Image: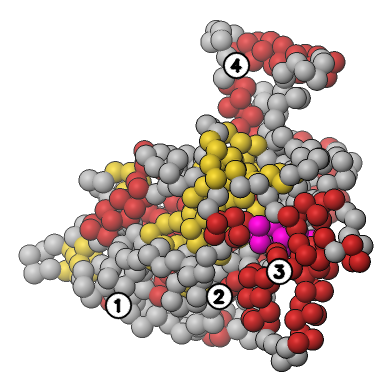
Amino acid sequence: MTAYGMLSGWMTAGKMACPCCMHHTKAFRLENGGKSSWFDCHRKFLPSDHPFRRNKDGFYKNRVVRSELPPRLTGEQVWNEVQTMPMIMDNIDEVRIPGYGDKHNWKKRSIFWELPYWSTNLIRHNLDVMHIEKNVFDNVFNTVMDIKGKTKDNIKARMDLKLYCKRKDLELLEHSNGRTIKPKANYTFTLEQKRAICEWVKCLKMPDGYASNLARCVDMKEGKLHGMKSHDCHVFMERLLPIAFSSLPDQTWKAITELSQFFRDLCSTSVRVDDLISLEKNIPIVICKLERIFPPGFFDSMEHLPIHLPYEARVGGPVQYRWMYPFERFLHHLKKKVKNKARVEGSIIESYLIEEISQFCTYYFETSVQSNNTSIGRTGGDHDLAQSLFPIFNLPGRFAGQCKSRFLEDKEFTAAMNHVLINCDEIQPYIEIFVETLRKTHPNMSDEHADKCIEENFAAWLKEYVDNPSNNVLDPNIHALAWGPLRIVKTWPIYFVNGFKFHTKAHSIGKSTMNCGVCVKGTGYGDYENDFYGQLEEIVQIEYPRIPLKKVVLFKCECFDPTIDRGTRLNKQYGIIQIRHNRHYGKYDPFIVADKAIQVYFAPHPICSRINADWWFVVKTKARGVIEDQQVDDSAYQEDFLDQNMVGISADIDLPANLLDVEGRFDEP
């Protein structure tokens, strides 16, 4: 936010630090904490009839909010304020403008106002989602983990709590020996719980390239995480925070989970305007829920700024084009070019010019010459789509590791052949003919019985059907499918497809990453209740005889039981899925087409008990370098299972009955 103030001229410090609300803010200075707080500044963003507005006990005590939504100033209105202010240059001392810190936060007139179109821009400066998300995560995580020196729930915060809130259970107590005792809140963890979470983070395995090694950040002695980079906080905030804090009281967990989902939805690679409008309506409710839980000292400007992020995304587009990640990475790329530390700028310029010229020259190289332009990416591979083959054959993908050969057993051969037939679009008309033939003799046959007949008898029926000259089936690809694949197959331990890197379960043993988690959609596409989850056992390439050569790559998986409440738990409100890792799918159907696989990873409960010891959380990942096809999946979220109309907001509006942790009653300062 410092760079925002330098470029815009509106300083991002003090009570008017928000460059969107400007002087319409209700932030105040804490009497004991000495810092500006945005506590109870968000009820005015709620609808006029919302119950939170009339709540006198859950927020600032004895206050009812009737004020309207603060206006968003246009470029012309801002220009009218700054046009008479001086434009500070580098060689001139700054001039303190009258009213600074009291009526406004302007320190200068930005040079960008010299641009003729600047006053017509809907957004003149972008709020940096990367640093806002990191700071919000740090405040939430350090407060819940009760990290000494970093928590926002300290002695001064409890002293301010007595002045501004009605929460007697959390007020400081004076001991008979003169010591001050801080009652333990139920939204913080004990040292044993903190160490359990740190141990969970230390043992957590994620896919290659998904995040950095979080185990290096763990301090088991103190029960805390340190040295987390911005991207580490990004992953933890959007994916792991609801899992790590799942043992918190239900009302606290819901509020933190809704905050996590807000950032996950906001940071989606594709967003819809109506969803962003829903986010804009929901984020004030989420922040108000947090205000009923945490003390006033928790709410600095970073907890307030998310209220403006959905509007900026609606006007400026997805955050990926406006946040600081690409610029930070590029700066890191430039800093690595420094060879002469006495001439840093010249060293960077010289190296960058050489890189740019070399890249330009590679466009004139022969295709056989290896360069950045001819290198195979994560989504590339050996494939041949010519020769009029069916789409299921020779799909793009790339093998790695040692290749082996083996023969399929009878049940493997039958399962693999049936799976390819059922998933081939060109075979669907023949399946319909087969089902119609069955229904002529069994008119009352159920769909379940028809599916069973397809699995058991369709392959043999199709072979007889295509070999019958009277049926006039001339396509050689149909004949190849009907006769089935060869018994001998090739296997590999690693496969790249659709931007994912998959390892077999055996190949992942002893590694610090997990690349064997697999998800495949069930029959109801888009309905995550029908999804199957499992672990990759073997990568198999089957071949069909006759020219041209036809290959299909299959994943042999060990799937978990998809039965709801028996093998799978589903939180529909927040889209959180758990699987029971010791219960497996009862039906023998181990193969899936590799091109249809989605990569997931599994995380156990951080604080295990007898009830949840057998359950793992499922976390879906997003393919790198792949843009989702909106015609196939009309979802605006980063994960397919987030089918919640972008709402996911619990309807609880009552004040938490008790924020005191009765088991660990006191924390000594």
* Span of residues in magenta: 417-425
Label 1: state its secondary structure: helix
Whichever of callouts 1 and 2 sits on the residue coming sooner in the sequence is 1
Q: Residue at x 35, y 66 (%)?
A: 614
Residue 168: which disc? 1
Which residue is situated farthest in the bottom direction here? 444
Q: Nearer the viewer, mark 4 or mark 1?
A: 4
Q: Position of residue 481 (x, y in %)?
A: 75, 55
Quadrant for the C terminus in the image: bottom left
Q: Which residue is mark 4?
A: 337
Residue at 50% from the left image edge and 83% from the top image edge: 653
Would residue 108 be counted in the magenta stretch? no
Q: Is residue 523 left or right of residue 226?
A: right
Numbered mark located on residue 572 in the image: 2
Single out the mark in the foreground, 2 or 3.
3
Q: Earlier in the sequence, mark 2 or mark 3?
A: 3
From the image, state whether disc 3 or disc 4 is nearer to you: 3
Query: Image check: 29 left or right of 117?
Result: left
Q: Amino acid at mark 1?
A: Lys
Q: Nearer the viewer, residue 190 or 524?
A: 524
